[in-house]
């Protein structure tokens, strides 16, 4: 019985195989049909290339630096009598910072004033003597020698008054040095001396305090040498080129300023040019030494052909896009990119307005591949 079961199974398999061979739909006609249909079309999403005025922007990394920073020193040897500020305080130009002991200088000024008054009295006396000698000479009762002596005495007394007045002015200036004020508006750093400390005039080894100007403030960054022409044209424009600073690594906008400086030479080792922008910085969102992301606008590209950034691919010959053709195949079109910002690519050459470019499904494509198109949409700038 077992042998008959095996034989029956073999017969059934043979009959099924013969039936598969003689099926008309699986014969040569089916193979020809499949060859006529060609390869399977890849589903893709396309978009129509648009046209718009695109701003020319460049990105870089920069750091904020103060326009001015002043180390405050004493201009006199003396003792700090009083301190009128605290560390980290915001000050305006002319605000009182420190007061030095001024008693000695006040006494010198008083002495100088007394000397001036004394010598003015002497001048008055000498002028009176000179007038009398002139009168005597005119009457023939005086001598020329006496007149010459009186003239000299009057001149000496007058010169003494001028010397006294100069000494008085100098001591008054030195007395003014006993009140130390803020040379610029800004923020105070660490205070190095407190009341009771002795200070020396223009001591190079220490500062009383440092004042750092926070508003306005500069941001320094670099751009490649190839952007030098754009920078020069932006500098010549009637309106300054706008520069925006963002918190490092984020899209948080900190401040907007104007292009203010382009270095006079390109740095040869790095092939870059140093650029500075000036920011009003009110409120103080930029801080000296802070690193920021910088975006600078260097003009406009009028009437540029535009496509979404997702359409742009990178190849061995440079950037390219897949262009959908009328026969439902694609062409890998090499393009020259003028700008790629905010998800929109401005094409300088290689693509025309209203051509269909593939924005989704590029990973399944190769030049000449068949595609199944979706409804095209116009690229928005």
Image (tube, grey):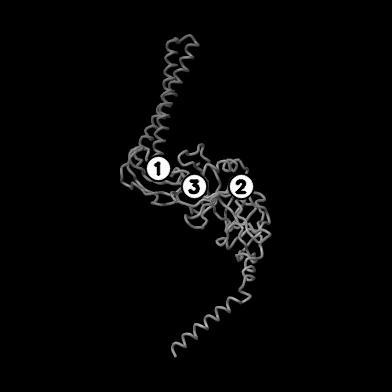
Q: Nearer the viewer, residue 190 or 259?
A: 259
Q: Position of residue 299 (x, y in %)?
A: 61, 47
Spatial CA span between label 2 and label 3 = 20 Å
> Which picture quadrant has residue 103?
top left
Q: Position of residue 245 (x, y in %)?
A: 51, 52
| Earlier residue among tags 2 and 3 | 3
Return the mark for residue 299: 2
Locate residue 163 relative to residue 298 in the image: left or right.
left
Instruction: Give the labeled residue for mark 1.
Output: 71
Spatial CA span between label 1 and label 3 = 21 Å
Spatial CA span between label 2 and label 1 = 40 Å
Kindly indicate whether the residue at mark 3 contacts the one at mark 2 (C-beta within 8 angstroms). Answer: no
Q: Residue sitting at 41 percent across and 20 percent down?
A: 156
Q: Nearer the viewer, residue 181 or 243?
A: 243
Q: Position of residue 97 (x, y in %)?
A: 40, 46
Q: Quadrant of the C terminus?
A: bottom right
Q: Position of residue 203 (x, y in %)?
A: 34, 38
Instruction: Give the labeled residue for mark 3.
Output: 219
| Earlier residue among tags 2 and 1 | 1
Above/below status of 240 relative to 109: below
Above/below status of 28 relative to 153: below
Return the mark for residue 9: none
Q: Secondary structure at mark 2?
A: strand
Q: Quadrant of the N terminus?
A: bottom left
Above/below status of 187 relative to 155: below
| Earlier residue among tags 1 and 3 | 1
Q: Residue sitting at 58 percent across and 77 percent down?
A: 20
Q: Nearer the viewer, residue 272 or 62?
A: 272
Q: Residue sitting at 62 percent across and 58 percent down?
A: 330
Crowd around label 2: few <14 · some 14–19 · many ≥20 (10 Å):
some
Crowd around label 3: few <14 · some 14–19 · many ≥20 (10 Å):
many
């Amino acid at each position: 019985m077992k042998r008959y079961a095996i034989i029956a199974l073999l017969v059934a398999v043979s009959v099924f195989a013969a039936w598969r061979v003689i099926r008309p739909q699986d014969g040569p006609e089916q193979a020809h049909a499949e060859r006529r249909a060609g390869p399977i079309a890849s589903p893709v999403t396309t978009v129509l290339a648009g046209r718009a005025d695109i701003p020319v922007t460049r990105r870089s990394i920069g750091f904020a630096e103060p326009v001015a920073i002043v180390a405050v020193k004493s201009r006199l040897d003396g003792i700090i009598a009083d301190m009128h500020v605290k560390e980290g305080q915001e000050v305006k130009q002319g605000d009182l910072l420190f007061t030095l002991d001024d008693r000695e200088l006040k006494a010198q000024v008083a002495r100088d004033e007394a000397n001036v008054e004394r010598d003015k009295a002497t001048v008055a006396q000498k002028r009176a003597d000179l007038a009398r000698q002139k009168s005597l000479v005119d009457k023939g009762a005086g001598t020329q020698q006496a007149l010459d002596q009186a003239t000299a005495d009057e001149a000496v007394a007058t010169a003494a008054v001028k010397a006294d007045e100069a000494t008085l002015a100098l001591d008054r200036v030195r007395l003014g040095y006993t009140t130390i004020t803020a040379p610029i508006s800004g923020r105070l750093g660490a205070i190095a001396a407190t009341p009771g400390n002795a200070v020396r005039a223009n001591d190079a080894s220490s500062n009383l305090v440092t004042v750092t100007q926070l508003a306005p403030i500069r941001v320094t960054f670099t751009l490649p040498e190839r952007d030098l022409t754009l920078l020069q044209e932006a500098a010549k424009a009637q309106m300054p080129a706008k520069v925006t600073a963002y918190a490092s690594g984020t899209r948080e906008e900190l401040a907007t300023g104007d292009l203010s400086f382009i270095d006079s030479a390109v740095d040869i080792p790095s092939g870059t040019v140093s650029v500075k922008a000036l920011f009003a910085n009110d409120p103080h969102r930029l801080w000296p030494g802070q690193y920021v992301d910088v975006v600078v606008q260097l003009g406009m590209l009028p009437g540029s052909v535009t496509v979404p950034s997702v359409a742009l691919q990178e190849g061995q010959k440079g950037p390219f896009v897949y262009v959908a053709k009328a026969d439902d195949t694609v062409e890998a079109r090499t393009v020259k990119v003028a700008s790629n910002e905010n998800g929109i690519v401005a094409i300088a050459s290689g693509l025309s307005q209203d051509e269909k470019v593939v924005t989704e499904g590029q990973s399944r494509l190769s030049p000449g591949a068949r595609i199944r198109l979706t409804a095209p949409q116009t690229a928005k700038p």
